[in-house]
Image (cartoon, coloured by chain):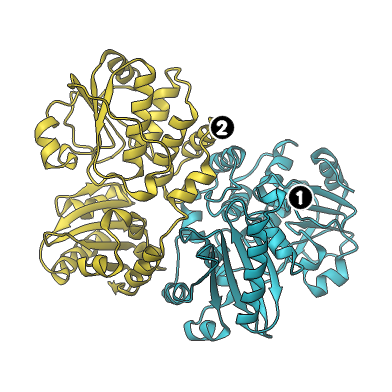
Chain colours: A yellow, B cyan
């Protein structure tokens, strides 16, 4: 059941012994939203704990709330567009027991008893800010920092087209509330290890072009991870590179999985719809940024993806226009 | 004479047949501030023209106001921290005839009859927004776009520590007023030519480290420009790279001039003061981003710069703390 901000807040006030979950391979919005919600719920006197995968190094920019030993009586998810994104184990254990899901994906597949979803929010953290501020929560500096992390990372630090006037206004309010944006950005965006700089130079050299330069593909192999000492959860930013090349409408990044096959990121420019390209391979996401998985060799995966991009170029879907 | 926003506005209302100038090698704030001011003054019924160097390709994201044939009776500068930054010819011709200088550099060297300077503004365009909004100017979408260009480029799209809550709030107001931030950012930040991508990969490979990794230096030669077909006014963004490496407090970029010698960019992290490092070589700028010029070979220039960074590391100046 889809609920309003008011109804979601009522639900949150009624829950206790809460387990918070987010998606596997957590990004800045997953981490920031989870920790901000954890802090606010505890400030309301509730017992709250959480489960999360390893947190990428660049996201360790503020203190993590402590986990709490408790037997969950309720489950809340943030930034989870589909219960399968919880990961196999958590999906099996908790997927059908979620009381409230707070999310901002247009492709959200309902799985919780109650769903608060707003695709106009650039980040789940932006929606959480609305939820808090409309219900009289005064944001402390640390909660503001975590909400800022969510919004800044999901918008490429306010670069991407999902950044609205409201997004910028929310960021202004968070900085006003004590988020140290300069220091946070330095950790989130302005710090690369020497190893990462070398990794990026190599990855850029793997760029190849298709469809008269409208499609650019970058391939990241397990061998490159080994050669540079970089691992997958350190390289979210790399997904932005192929689309940055002039004339490219679809920028694709293939990352080889440890078990073989590829995790695929698709970033598009108007009028192409990344979510509908990825939907052809059972993936999903946003209009300009989506993901899916493909088996086989890099060449096979590229052939399928380029064909899907070509079909989308020929007849862009309504949402992408 | 330093003037208030109110006094500066009174002066602007009294001037006519206005020549607008900005600094040579114009960046986004120079271009955006110049064009926004031009549009607003014309909307007040004034005759206005401008002089500007070639505008970098990534800044051609909105319509340029037409130049007007007029004999200037008054001169206004924007984003010019020192009259020598007008370039030799313009400095000689107009440097002592400037009625009003609107600027945001902490190192501003007074040269105009009246100076409106606010170093808390992240960009001259942010100060112009205050000037306009406090005097009842309703910002049209195109003026909003040019002010957005100024603010977004001078803050690295809201990444740098000069971005305040007020900066973000101003950006929100500009998007509300019709600046299409998604499209503007794509032009300003998200578009690289294939040639630029190759240039960047080469430049990254030139990185060398000094002072136990606290200082990183990138060297860009005329030969690299020739090899990749890239020219200097296309590569402002490159200055940000050396400081991005973990542990680096001073990131330095040396760009070889056509006539020999080096144009130097210094970017720092707290507590180092980039402006005072550059001041040792007759340069200037902001606390975290400044510039200067040095003669000789790359090795000689690096030796002097590293010594200056070392001195600053040992005794950081008050402003940099």
Residue B26 appears in the rendering: no
- x%, y% of residue A194? 41, 65
Residue A162 sits in which quadrant? top left
- The local crowd at label 1, few if under 14, some if 14 to 19, many if 20 or more residues have their Cα within 10 Å, is some
**Of the pair B304 and B184, the residue shown nearer to us:** B304
Instruction: Report which residue position mark 1 lands on.
Output: B41
The chain carrying label 2 is A
- x%, y% of residue A231? 27, 58
Residue B121 appears in the rendering: yes
How far apart marks 2 and 1 lie (CA) works out to 33 Å
Image height of A138 relative to A155, above or below: above
Do tags 2 and 1 sit on the same chain?
no
Image height of B189 relative to A70, above or below: below
**Residue shown at 58% from the left, 70% from the top:** B253
The chain carrying label 1 is B
Q: Is residue B253 left or right of residue B284?
A: left
- x%, y% of residue B29? 65, 56
Image height of A8 relative to B308, above or below: above
Residue A172 sits in which quadrant? top right
- x%, y% of residue A190? 47, 55
**Of the pair B88 and A195, the residue shown nearer to us:** A195
Instruction: Report which residue position mark 2 lands on.
Output: A176
Q: The N terminus of chain A lies in which quarter of the figure?
A: top left
Return the mark for residue A303. none
> Under tag 2, what secondary structure?
helix
Residue B235 sits in which quadrant? bottom right
């Amino acid at each position: 059941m889809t609920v309003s901000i008011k109804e979601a807040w009522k639900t949150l006030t009624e829950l206790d012994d809460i387990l918070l979950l987010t998606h596997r391979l957590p990004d800045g919005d997953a981490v920031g939203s989870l920790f901000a919600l954890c802090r606010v719920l505890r400030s309301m006197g509730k017992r709250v704990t959480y489960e999360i995968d390893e947190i990428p190094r660049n996201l360790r920019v503020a203190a993590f709330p402590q986990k709490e030993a408790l037997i969950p009586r309720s489950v809340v998810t943030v930034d989870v567009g589909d219960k399968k994104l919880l990961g196999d184990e958590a999906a099996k254990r908790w997927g059908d027991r979620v009381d409230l899901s707070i999310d901002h994906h247009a492709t959200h597949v309902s799985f919780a008893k109650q769903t608060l979803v707003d695709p106009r929010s650039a980040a789940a953290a932006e929606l959480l800010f609305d939820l808090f501020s409309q219900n009289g929560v005064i944001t402390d500096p640390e909660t503001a920092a975590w909400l800022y992390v969510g919004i800044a990372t999901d918008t490429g630090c306010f670069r991407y087209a999902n950044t609205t006037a409201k997004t910028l206004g929310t960021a202004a309010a968070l900085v006003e509330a004590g988020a140290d944006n300069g220091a946070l950005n330095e950790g989130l965006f302005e710090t690369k290890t020497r190893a990462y700089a070398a990794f990026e130079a190599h990855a850029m050299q793997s760029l190849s072009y298709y469809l008269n330069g409208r499609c650019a593909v970058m391939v990241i192999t397990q061998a490159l991870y080994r050669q540079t000492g970089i691992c997958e959860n350190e390289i979210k930013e790399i997904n932005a590179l192929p689309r940055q090349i002039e004339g490219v409408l679809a920028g694709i990044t293939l990352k080889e999985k440890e078990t073989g096959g590829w995790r695929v990121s698709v970033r598009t420019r108007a009028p192409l719809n990344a979510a509908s390209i990825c939907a052809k391979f059972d993936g999903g996401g946003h209009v300009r940024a989506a993901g899916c998985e493909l088996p086989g060799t890099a060449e096979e995966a590229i052939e399928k993806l380029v064909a899907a991009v070509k079909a989308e170029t020929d007849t862009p879907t309504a949402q992408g226009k």
